[in-house]
Image (spheres, rainbow, N blue to C red):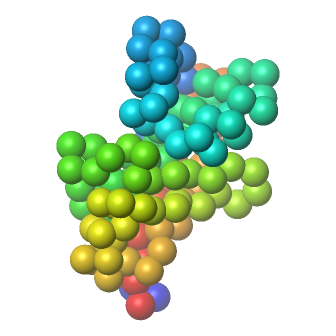
Amino acid sequence: MNIIGLGVDLADVDRVRGLLARYGDSFRRRCFTDHEWDYAHRFSDPAGRLAARFAGKEAVMKSLGTGWRRLRWTDIEITGGGRPHAVLSGRAAVRAEMLSVREVLVTVTHTRDQAIVMAIAVGE
């Protein structure tokens, strides 16, 4: 296994809550997949889970050596429940293939106020 890239990101839960309140469905559709949205809304306060997914997407982008201006947010899905996974599609999958990334490992943790995610892009 070869480490190709490393990324980490920290998201403020209240900031994500504010973006949801301010931009509503446009923020949701731009940043989250339906699966991420549904998973987060299984909890009484979905903002923490959504902040973790938001941070996860940033961390994955960093591990792929790029940022949100070159990849679509919804081309990266951070799964919930059990061990999290990064599921890549679209331009994110193309970027990973270009770098010979076999998988992006992610770890997620969050408190009431913050979410942090680390991502490691690995190849053969």
Q: What quarter of the picture does the C terminus occupy? A: bottom left
Decide: is 56 above or below 13. Answer: below
On the image, the x and y values in percent for residue 88 come to 45, 62
Instruction: Judge from the rendering whether residue 52 lies leftward or rightward of residue 76; answer left or right.
Output: right
> How many numbered discs, if any?
0
The residue under the point 38% across, 44% down is: 73
The residue under the point 63% across, 53% down is: 79
Residue 69 in view (yes/no): yes
Q: Nearer the viewer, residue 101 or 74?
A: 74
The residue under the point 48% across, 74% down is: 103
Residue 5 in view (yes/no): no
The residue under the point 21% across, 43% down is: 69
Q: Nearer the viewer, residue 115 or 21?
A: 21
On the image, the x and y values in percent for residue 60 come to 40, 56
Instruction: Judge from the rendering whether residue 37 lies leftward or rightward of residue 45; answer left or right.
Output: left
Decide: is 122 above or below 34. Answer: below
On the image, the x and y values in percent for residue 68 come to 27, 44
Q: Nearer the viewer, residue 2 or 84?
A: 84
Instruction: Judge from the rendering whether residue 74 lies leftward or rightward of residue 51; answer left or right.
Output: left
Which quadrant would residue 93 be assigned to in this image?
bottom left
Decide: is 89 above or below 10. Answer: below
Instruction: Judge from the rendering whether residue 52 lies leftward or rightward of residue 43; answer left or right.
Output: left
On the image, the x and y values in percent for residue 65 come to 25, 61
Which quadrant would residue 63 be assigned to in this image?
bottom left
